[in-house]
Image (cartoon, rainbow, N blue to C red):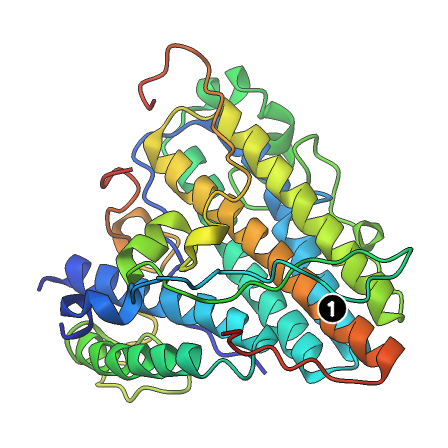
Amino acid sequence: MIIDNQPDMYMQAAGDCVPQETVIEDVKLARAYVPFEIMCSTFMPLESLKKGTAFPPLYNAYGWERKGKGDDMYE
Amino acid sequence: MNRDEMLKKLSALDFYIIDLHLYLNTHPTDRDAIMKHNAVVKEARELREEFERLYGPLLSYNSTSKCPWQWIENPWPWQYKFNFDLAGDDK
Amino acid sequence: MWVYEKKLEYPVKIKKPDPRMAKVILTQYGGPDGELAASIRYLSQRFSMVTPEAKATLNDIGTEELAHLEMVGAMVKQLTQGASIKEIEDSGMAAYYADHDKAIYPASASGVPFTAAYVQSKGDPRTDLYEDMAAEQKARSTYEYLLNMADDPDVIGPLKFLREREVVHFQRFGESLRHVQEYLENKKRYSMGKMK
């Protein structure tokens, strides 16, 4: 299919694109602020499906790893 | 492409659309994202039509049917044999 | 209104029955931090939202949660299908089996039937969005605990997918909160395009 042969459409040179807001102005007490994400590049569709998101900075954003039970076959 | 490969491809395109759609709901002025979204929607549309032509309807209220009524046909999505392999694919 | 698409968001193809996992995975069907709670929470709260971004987010994430509910149901179904009565008993599912056979019923891992007490729809859109962010964290943690107990790649794949979706949803609710806060406090609408 066409789309899969155009990886550039998805992975445009991120270059100096920062995929999120890094400064939030005018913050007030007693409120929570989540920085806005900014789309720079995305995974290709099949990779997105496997990972659960099209957005690289949101993929495993917490660096979590499955503990497993020791002698299982997966990890 | 066999049925499983086609369904895998379509599921991938549709998922990409979903994730971009949610992003666009909070970033309505991101022109780039809209372009990516629209390009994939067009491709998914074509692939979905092709899939439906070969393997029967996917969307309720959107597809025409042969006789007997195709919508009810097995397998349904919660059945093992409806689904393609992905999990063990390459981690 | 809703349209049904006859495919799962992410494939569920589990070769090996495992009623032990079925019992705990069910908690994401009808438990306190599960997908039914999530869908009804967001689809109910959407009526209180005040900016277009927030209305769309609640509407569409609520809809996606229904797709996740479907995946969880499919997982439990495939994990019990083909299991013998002895396997059901040995896995601790005897009580559930007595009430439900191998049917899918909205309950938690400990058998507590689903209740609307798991959700709130408070009216103040900020309050609702904070709840939604908390809900996504609870769901993420639950998937992590389920993943720690799983050893079958066919089960791990969908659970990892569902866990990642919670992280993404949290981000989107957080962004919606920014829009709503900006609107209610500063009477302005954010314009979040590309920042060059």
Q: Residue furthest top?
A: A71
Toward which corner of the image does residue C48 lie, by quadrant?
A: bottom right
Residue B80 is left or right of residue C189, and the answer is left
Q: Position of residue B79 (x, y in %)?
A: 34, 51
Label 1 CA crowd tier, 10 Å (few <14, some 14–19, many 20+): many
Q: Position of residue A35 (x, y in %)?
A: 65, 59
Q: Nearer the viewer, residue C97 or C30?
A: C30
Q: Residue at x 62, y 32 (%)?
A: C96
A51 up-or-down from C171: above or below: above
Chain where mark 1 sits: C
Q: Residue at x 13, y 68 (%)?
A: A5
C105 up-or-down from C82: above or below: below
Toward which corner of the image does residue A34 lie, by quadrant?
A: bottom right
B49 up-or-down from A15: above or below: below
Residue position marked by numbered label 1 in the rendering:
C178
Q: Residue furthest left?
A: B1
Q: Position of residue C187 (x, y in %)?
A: 85, 85
Can residue A44 be seen at all in this image of the molecule? yes
Residue B77 is left or right of residue C150, and the answer is left
Q: Nearer the viewer, residue B5 or A58?
A: A58
Which amino acid, mark 1? Arg
Quarter that holds the N terminus of chain C: bottom right
